[in-house]
Amino acid sequence: MGSFFRRLWYLLRRSRHDAELREELEAHRALRQARLERDGLTPAEAEDGSRRALGNVTLAREDVRGVWIAPLIDDFCQDLRLSGRRLVSRPVFASAAILTFGLGIGANTAVFSVAETLLLRQLPVPRPDELFSFVRVGARERGESFSFPAFAYVQSNAHSLGDVAGYATRLAHVTANGREVDVGVHLVSGGYFRVLQVAPSIGRALDDVNEQDAPAVAVVSDAFQHRYLSPEVSAIGALVTINDAAYTVVGVMPRRFEGLSLDAPADVWLSIRSQPQLDGSSALESAGSNWVRMIARLPGGLRHPPHTDEGERLAQAFKASWGGDLDIRGIDLVSASRPDSGARDLLTAPLALMLVVVALVLLVACINIAYLLHARATARAREFAIQAAIGASRARLARQLVTETMLLAVIGGTVGIAFASLGTRGLLTYIVNHAYGAFQTPEWLAMEVNPAILVFTATVAVLAGLATGGVPARRAGSADLVLGLRSGSCSTGDRHAARGGHRLVAGQLTLSLLLVAIAGTFIQSFRDLRQIDLGFRPEGLSQFDVAWGRPQLPDSQLSEVASEILEDLQHTPGVTAASMSVPGVFSRSTWQATVSLPASLRESLLVPVTSAAPGYLSTLGVVLRRGRDFSPEDTAQAPPVVILSEAAARTLFPGTDPIGRDVRLYGAASPVRVIGVATDIRLRDVLAPPPPLVYVPYLQGKGPRAGSVTWTLRSALPAAALARQVERVVHSKSPTATVRVRAVVDVVGESVFLERTTAWLTGLFGLLGLGLAVVGTYGVVSFKAQGRIPEVGLRLALGATPSGIRRQMWSDAMKPIALGLGIGGVLSVGAIRVISGYFQGLSAAAPVAVASALFLLMSTAALACFVPVLWASKGDPASALRCE
Amino acid sequence: MGLTNTPSDLLPGTLELLILKALSAGAKHGYGIVEHLRLASDDILSVGESALYPALQRILLRGWAKAEWGTSENNRRARYYTLTASGRRQLTAERAEFDRMVGAIQRVLLTS
């Protein structure tokens, strides 16, 4: 074995070794030259002669290399050939093992690539580590957006923070080449591309000159160019219409660069000064509306923000220069090497959990294969004994077994990468579309077999191979030669083998129980989720909104059309109740309002506000605890009124009746009368307790914008029929509009997509683990029972009763099962306690889940034991003894 | 003439045996071993470098000798080989084996 390590050592420092040999040969030649000179030759002749005598140096070096490496490669090739032959000769075993490895490694690769892509991948710009984004620190909240004046101030005054750039993301309606499409548009300041150090692949980028003049120019993404601009003509100079304003394309960004937002990738970049044209109203002058995100590349390539009070100084100076009441106290810097994303925090825990779960699945799979090999190694004891007898060293035998599993694992890993690349793309698209709410999958998120993933998969495959091969290899290494040669195929059992098998069974049940318990907990908690009372009745409820065609109607006209649609819906047969609101329940967007008592303006609440038409609350199934609903008389001319949720009423008017009292909304001077108190509802989050809410009358027009109305219907009609009715009504008012009707149950379901996906995936993997555990346990027990047939025969012949033998075999088989389940139970409780810290609502589900998992595995394992034990004890003593 | 670049001129393992013997007197570099063999065999054994160095590497690989860099007579860096304990054991064993072999060959040749 010593020479094996010396060889490895040589391999590691091969080039150094080669250089030393060259030097040694040169020294040799010099010595010979010196002797030839002493013999009377001229130095030139001596050098010539010494070189001739040295002969072919390259050949000598080749030979030396051969001494060290050839046997290593030779052994390896031999092991590999032998392993290959063995696997080919056992195609069923080989394909089962490769498939098991493939599924296990593939699941690991898939989850890892999703995690790598969403959580770890950096921005495709030079040196992303140097990028930092700014966080606004206010008295009430921390925010990532700043007002435009704040950005302009910081940009021109933040000298020690280097070059500062600003950007904002929008979804806009674009017409290009006669096609209409909604794409991501990023508004960027002049320094944006300079700070990021991204150069356009064609044309030019936007710079400070563009920002000042604010000409109508645009830069487009590579994907946009290929999709929507004519491929024959150069994109430069093409005209695109964005929200009714025309822009000239001046540059195309390189492939993969799609801005700094993962949730809303950019297809078009416009100057930040184009904001008024894009949004329809200017936000450039207001210090109260925060919409610009800031990013900087620290000077001198710093990787950590300097500890200065620069942020605080800037914030205070800006506040002083502006002179208003602004909620900004300081500015923090956070790393922006990865794209900004609101969903990353949401996904970290589920993805980490999935990584653990798939690792467990792979371990269970490894144990299964290890057991198959272990069983074969036991059966192959004779083969090993012969090999050892004709001179194979034990190390060599063990190495050969490990090579065999490595080969299986590597082939399995290759299969796994194929599985993973099939699964990852779908998984990514699903996650991005649901969790991120992104309207398109970012181009650079494309799954690719990149070095990180390859290294991960290779490591997993090698570890799996080593872990799997280790057990049978140790067994082969310690095999008793004489016993192996003598006993042949009918062994009376070998203590080593039995103990190895026991450990494998115990380990497998431990891991399977852990897996099934975790899966069960998630499934149980997801089922609990569906029982949660939302505060309204989602069954039979549908909602829809309308995308009006272009040109867009002004808000006043829209509100008129919306009311007309509502009126028609209320008279549609099959519709029990209909109303409208901004926003609907479980909408992606929320509107917030500050609410306070007239006396204490300082202590205001920031709560979600819904603008509701008369009958909205009763359509939802929300009960009014006190007071009345909005009526058609609550118009802009009538005195302003508001309905509070119970939680809001409790907070604002603790212990008193709020009906008839006044509150102030949006900090306005005029009071608003409270006319009702509604039961609490979960507005957008199933898991969180119901938040305090306020409802304002839609007809008074004080609340959220009328342009984004959601209609809510209660109807017994089937979804398709209802959708047809709704479309007919809407198209009679606006033929170009598009309508999307959805059951509220589905909308609520989508809001818990992450919980659902986690439950589904863990459930799936739990099932896989359970299946593997059953197959494995059954295999182990039945194999052991089979191995004991001669022993049982002997005992029967000597007068033991079948029931006595059954009892003994039963207790032998159950011992490792009980041990494994015991350890697994303790581990599961601990693991679920740790996991509960990262997921809501798990702890309630855990006890039931662990208990059911325990019961499930115990009964399956018992069943797996029962059949083989019964079968073995019924053996015919004569035939059992004959094979001895 | 004696040993050249093909070690198969000798009985297998003989070159290693000769090198081990050369080293048993003390540490030597490659050229020193060649010179030692040449002088000790009255100019009959002349070992080529392309046979010597692979043989030295085989000896290193098996752990019979270890190599260290030192300074040669003409003030150059040269690699000196020293016999290890297992090398000494190997030398004794191989000598006995070689004697047995040569004796056997002798007897075969002497049998008429």
Image (spheres, helix red, strand yellow):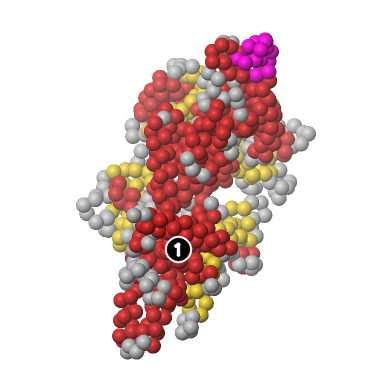
Q: Nearer the viewer, residue A302 or B53?
A: B53
Q: Nearer the viewer, residue A444 or A379?
A: A379
Q: Residue B23: give x, y in percent of width and height.
A: 51, 70
Q: Using the rendered image of the protein, determine whether residue A508 is visible from the camera's viewpoint.
A: no
Q: Is residue A796 magenta?
A: yes
**Residue A94's quadrant in the figure?**
top left
Q: Image point 55% across, 20% down: which residue?
A: A884
Dominant secondary-structure state across the stretch colored magenta: helix
Q: Which residue is mark 1?
A: B16
**A313 to A271, vertically: above or below:** below
**Residue A621's quadrant in the figure?**
top right
Q: Is residue A104 magenta?
A: no
Secondary structure category for the residue under label 1 = helix
Q: Using the rendered image of the protein, determine whether residue A789 is visible from the camera's viewpoint.
A: yes
Quick one: label 1, few (<14), some, or many (20+) residues within 10 Å? some
**A142 to A594, vertically: above or below:** below
Q: Residue A293: give x, y in percent of width and height.
A: 51, 56
**A480 to A805, vertically: above or below:** below
Q: Residue A469: give x, y in percent of width and height.
A: 52, 39
Q: Image point 71% across, 47% down: which residue?
A: A603
Q: Nearer the viewer, residue A669 or A826?
A: A826
Q: Image point 36% across, 29% down: which residue?
A: A731
**B23 to A284, vertically: above or below:** below
Q: Left or right of A801: which side holds A359?
A: left
Q: Which residues are magenta?
A: A793-809
Q: Residue A774: give x, y in percent of width and height.
A: 56, 24
Q: Left or right of A823: which side holds A565?
A: left
Callout 1: residue from which chain? B
Q: Nearer the viewer, residue B84 or A74?
A: B84
Residue found at the very far right of the displayed protein: A655
The amino acid pointed to by label 1 is: Glu
Q: Image point 48% across, 54% down: which residue?
A: A122
